[in-house]
Image: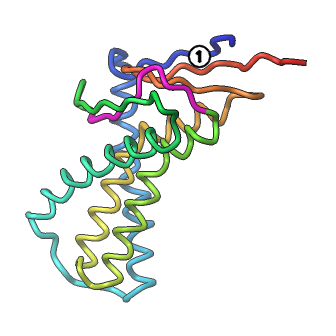
Amino acid sequence: MKLLKELDFIHNKKVILALNITAVLLIFPFLALFTWIAILMYGKGSEVFHFFDLFYLLVLMVIHELIHGFFFKVLGDENTKVKFGFKSGMAYATSPGSRYSRKRMLVIILAPFFLISLALTLIYALHILTATSYIVLASFHAAGCAGDFFLAATILQQKGDIAVEDTEVGINIYQKENTK
């Protein structure tokens, strides 16, 4: 296999800064999206955001990484090992040395965004969350997925049949050799 691209998120300060700026900017379209969903479901609300909801953001961050870890294991092989950590202001799940197809890695990368967004929407639909709490939690979580969106976009930009290796600092993308 030929190495096409190495992405190091942990040590590249420019990438970290760009992802943080992107996450802040993404809050606005996600606030609009989740406000629109809330209004579609129940109309305008006048609830307040509870300070305790900030604790839920931390819980969501842990759940987010656990979902990555779960899919690393489920879509990996019998040797797949998962590690969790926090470096350079980012929580992460990693499966160093594990290689995945494009489709499997996209599932691993995007599963937390879709599953947590869906779960929060269902919890809101059951009136467990107020509209304001739903909008803030869903928007801030989605914006926090900026790194995942960047990885997914990078993988989707690659041509041909690729393999994606997870590393402790990011990913490596390989072009698979033709066996004809």
Residue 148 drawn at (x, y percent): 45, 40
Q: Is residue 41 above or below residue 15?
A: below
Quarter of the N terminus within the rendering: top right
Mark 1 is surrounded, within 10 Å at the Cα level, by few (under 14), some (14 to 19) or many (20 or more) other residues, namely some
Q: Amino acid at mark 1?
A: Lys
Q: Residue furthest top?
A: 2
Pick the residue in front: 45 or 127. 127
Quadrant location, the C terminus: top right
The residue to which callout 1 is attached is: 5
Residue located at (35% from left, 36% from top): 21
Identity of the residue drawn at 12% across and 57% down: 55
The percent position of residue 169, horizontal first and vertical second, equals 38, 20
SS assignment at label 1: strand
Q: Relative to residue 171, is residue 10 drawn left or right?
A: left
The residues colored magenta run: 90-100
Compared with 92, 131 (above or below) is: below
